[in-house]
Every structure is written in structure tokens, then in C-alpha cells.
Amino acid sequence: MSLTASDLGVVTASFLASGVELVEALTIVLAMGVARSWRAALWGTGAAVVVLTVITVALGTVVGTAVSRSALQLVVGTLLLIFGLQWLRKAILRSAGLKALHDEDATFAEEQVAAQAAGHELRYGLDWYAFVISFKGVFLEGLEVVFIVVTFGASAHSIPLAAGGAAAAGVIVLVVGAVIHRPLAAVPENTLKYVVGLLLSTFGVFWVVEGLGTFAPGGGSLGWPGGDLALPVLLATWLGASQLAIGTLRRTRPPVTA
């Protein structure tokens, strides 16, 4: 089966967005494992993954069947545009030197200090602090992954593709983390967030316009000239606009360190 431009975008966005969020979750789990208890950290991680899987399946089933495709595209496109612009704004500010880059090593050190200072409490044979912090970290970071998988997958009728992209990112992050036992500080996180912001914004506009058909007689989705070929054009437009913003900010505002 050949993949369309829309399918490739769904897989790529799901993979990259999931990778960014899971790198941040991995930092928390590693800190709990090193400073407290690997057993509790891994149990917390596993429990969060189970809960997130259930939420993904439940939401995917409901979202995919409860509303028409055009209405779904309008709602999902709007949400993706909101999320995408937030990611894009942060990436632009960081690229322009107006916002500090995220430092996984610093986060790891902070989590370790907090873990070492916390009291020790055992529940069900587990270090409860390490379990709860690992669960919370993976669950909260994973919720955004669930959102992207469900919304992208449902709108494009490709939940398996979106889930596959997210799962592939998860496997890679976990394997690398298990091998090096250190935060993945070398990952170009701002670049990845920039790319994801571009993709979310692109698909957001694409699906919002298609979803406007829900207000037309018949309620069917509107079509773009050229179909999926409009996606590269929208992506190039967002890229050009964001690069213009970065260049302008670099010239007109002094850099800050926080």
C-alpha cells in the first residue's frame, strides 16, 4: 500500500512529537531510577503506559464514530493549529535567542536533587516517591502524544499509522535510554519542536478549511486544489513565515538568558 502525502505527514508528526515528549519523560524516569529505585521507576512507567494505551483506544473509538468527518476535521484542525502555533512560537523564540534552550542535563540534576531530599515510603513493596513521580512524568508527557495520535489518526482515518509513528519513537527513545543510562541531552530538541510545530500548523490549516464543509449543504468536507499536494505548499508557507520571524527578532531584539 502506497502512502499519500497526508499519511506521511501523520506518521512523521506523530513520530517526532512523541519522540520529543518521551525524551522529557525519560529524563524523569532515569533520575528516579538512579537516585531512588529502578524497580519503582519502571513500575511507574509501565502503569502510565497502560493507562495511556487505554485512553488512546477509548478516545480513538469515540472520536472516530461520534461525529461526521467534516465536523471532526474542523474541531481537530482548530486544536492542532492552537497546539502547533504554541510549539512554533517557542521554537522561534529559542532560535532567535530570546528564550533559553531546554537543558535535559539540568532537568536530570534537578530531579535527582529532589528525589534524594524526599522521604522514603514503601507501598506494595515499591519506593512510592519514585513510582509516583515516574508515573506522573510519563503520563503527563504522554497525554500530548495521545492527543496527537488520536486527532491526527481520526482526521486522516489513519489511527494505526499515527500510533505506529508514536510507538516507533517510544521504542527508539527507550532503547537508547536503556543503553546509555543518561538523559538524551544531545537530541536537537528545539529543532524537533520547530519541525513538529510546522507540521501541526500545516495540518491544522488544511483540516480547518476542509472541515468548513460541515456548514455547507450536505455537510461534506471541502477539497483543496490539488488535494494532498496543498500540504507541501502550506508547509513551505509556514516555514518561510517562521524564518522571517526568526530573522526579524534576531535583528530587532537583544537576546535573553531565561
Image (cartoon, grey):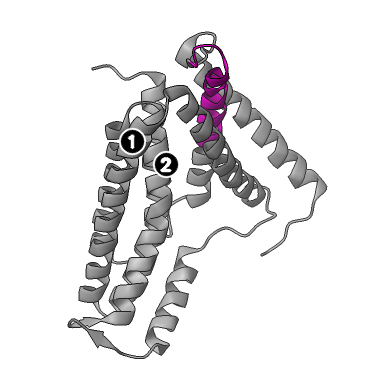
Residue for point 48% across, 17% down: 221
Which disc number belongs to residue 148?
Answer: 2
Q: Position of residue 65 (x, y in %)?
A: 34, 31
Magenta residues span 198-219
Q: Nearest the camera: 226 or 70? A: 70
Residue for point 49% across, 40% down: 196
Residue 32 within the magenta-colored segment of the rendering: no
Q: Position of residue 155 (x, y in %)?
A: 41, 29
Q: Quadrant of residue 238?
A: top right
Residue for point 65% across, 29% down: 240
Q: Which residue is mark 1?
A: 162
Residue 216 within the magenta-colored segment of the rendering: yes
* Magenta highlight: main SS: helix
Q: Position of residue 149 (x, y in %)?
A: 37, 40
Mark 1 touching mark 2, by CB under 8 A?
yes
How dense is the environment of label 2, judged by Cα within 10 Å: few (below 14), some, or many (20 and up)? many
Which disc number belongs to residue 247?
Answer: none
The residue furthest left is 125
Residue for point 57% across, 58% down: 101
Amino acid type at image mark 2? Ile
Amino acid type at image mark 1? Ala
Left or right? Give the position of 242 relative to 195. right
Q: Position of residue 186 (x, y in %)?
A: 43, 56
